[in-house]
Image: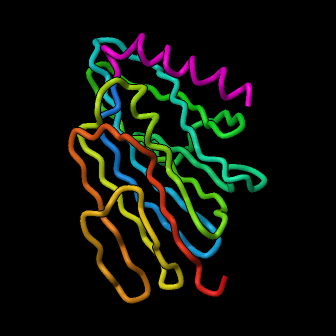
Amino acid sequence: MKKILFLLPLFFLSNSIIAQTFNFFKEEIIFEIDPVFFTVNGDYYFKNNSDQTIFPLISYPVRSNGIRKPFDTIMVYDNSDPSTALKLIIIDTVARFTIKLLPFSEKMIKVIYKQKHNGTDARYILLTTRSWNKPINEARYSVVVRRNIEINQFSISPDKSVDFGDTTVYYWRRKNFMPDKDFEMHFRVDGK
């Protein structure tokens, strides 16, 4: 736990120093809940507003659910070279990676991870968005739930849902989004 507390101040400090030249402006995330795993497939958009190439270090926190390890699998890709995964440093519940942003450029980074859930809830950490000191221009979320999962409650109400028979998909879209809570999903797995 001491390691996480040490990393977070560095994350906030690095963001405040380069906040004028570097920003995180959009995310599009598909969550999936099955009887065993909670999966996140996210596209994160960053922008370099300066005339210099920069190499920001990104800290990506993941909720620890008390089950052995926070990640079952995690992969991070730079869309400019999607065939090669970025090098990760994982300490406790934080994955860290560096991205390269050319002058006045935008870049999409894909993060895919899955972790075992406890059979009743899953949480995606949104509150770290506040460390950027500005809202996300656009956030799009969808949750794919298989028929054998019953949703009891979301911490953020969905805009709509569509039943596809074997799955139901819930959708959210936010503009100028500054989260005031994490994205929590409370559910029940049929047969448990």
Tell me the residue at 30%/63% (across/down): 158
Q: Position of residue 4 (x, y in %)?
A: 67, 29
* Image label count: 0
Q: Which residue is most to the left?
A: 175
Tell me the residue at 72%/26% (across/down): 3
Quadrant in which the N terminus is drawn: top right
Q: Position of residue 139 (x, y in %)?
A: 30, 47
Left or right relative to 88: residue 173: left
The stretch drawn in magenta includes residue 8: yes
Tell me the residue at 29%/14% (across/down): 50
Tell me the residue at 74%/50% (across/down): 69
Q: Range of the magenta residues?
A: 1-22
The dominant secondary structure in magenta is helix
Quadrant of residue 19 within the rendered picture? top left
Quadrant in which the C terminus is drawn: bottom right
Q: Nearer the viewer, residue 52 or 151?
A: 151
The stretch drawn in magenta includes residue 103: no
Q: Position of residue 75 (x, y in %)?
A: 58, 48
State whether residue 29 is above or below residue 102.
Answer: below
Left or right relative to 28: residue 57: right
